[in-house]
Image: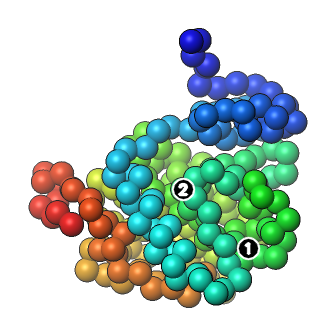
Amino acid sequence: MVALPDRLLMTYEEYIAWESTQEMRHEFWDGEVVAMAGGSRNHNRVSFNFSKLLDDALIGRPCEMYIADVKVQVKPKRKYFYPDVVVTCDERDRNDSQVVAFPCLIIEVLSPSTEAYDRGFKFSQYRSFETLQEYVLVQVEQPIVEVFQRNEQRQWVFFEYGLGDRLFLKSVNIEINVSDLYRQIQFDRSTEDISL
């Protein structure tokens, strides 16, 4: 089997046709196709825990939560990313089964290989969404959740939560115990002497 390079160049139309046949997910940045990094067991568990808690809390509400395989359209035909979890409460997102274009909440579970990218480039791109109210970064090496929340003046305000805290997601009016996000996670004893 021949390995593909990490980055490929193609048009948007080529990307959409090609990516639907791939086993791995690929993001699209202005003609450049970038393979997504694989996640660890802890990354997978935290993503699952967060998505389950959100999905359960959103039952009966007009919001929809998606994980991993639904693209977020930052710029039509130019920039598409795959966040770990995305929530939309916008009717306009009901027309496309593959893309969310009007998110209110985006969650990225951090990996050592993607942390700088998620904090920097991705967040700078996500801030262009008029509908985005919160961007959440969840660490897996230690129990810390960082929330960037857009206030009424359209400024981004930072909040940090730890194990004993209750995380309030204003965008969807949901409160979550941070310890529930880290259920079944074994932390490295050198960083945290905690086993949930």
Three-letter amino acid code of the residue under disc 1: Thr
* Secondary element type, mark 2: loop
* Secondary element type, mark 1: loop
Give the residue at x 31% y 66%. 182
Q: In screen coordinates, is 47 left or right of 163?
A: right
Q: Nearer the viewer, residue 92 or 167?
A: 92
Which corner quadrant holds the C terminus?
A: bottom left
Label disc, if present, on residue 84 of the rendered structure: 2
Q: In the rendered image of this protein, does residue 74 appear above or below residue 116?
A: below
Label disc, if present, on residue 146 of the rendered structure: none
Q: Residues within 10 Å of mark 1 (few under 14, many from 20)?
A: some
Label located before the other in sequence (1 or 2): 2
Residue 56: x and y, percent? Answer: 51, 79
Give the residue at x 43% y 43%. 39
Display colour scheme? rainbow
Give the residue at x 82% y 76%. 91
Q: Is residue 74 visible?
A: no
Q: Nearer the viewer, residue 62 or 116?
A: 62
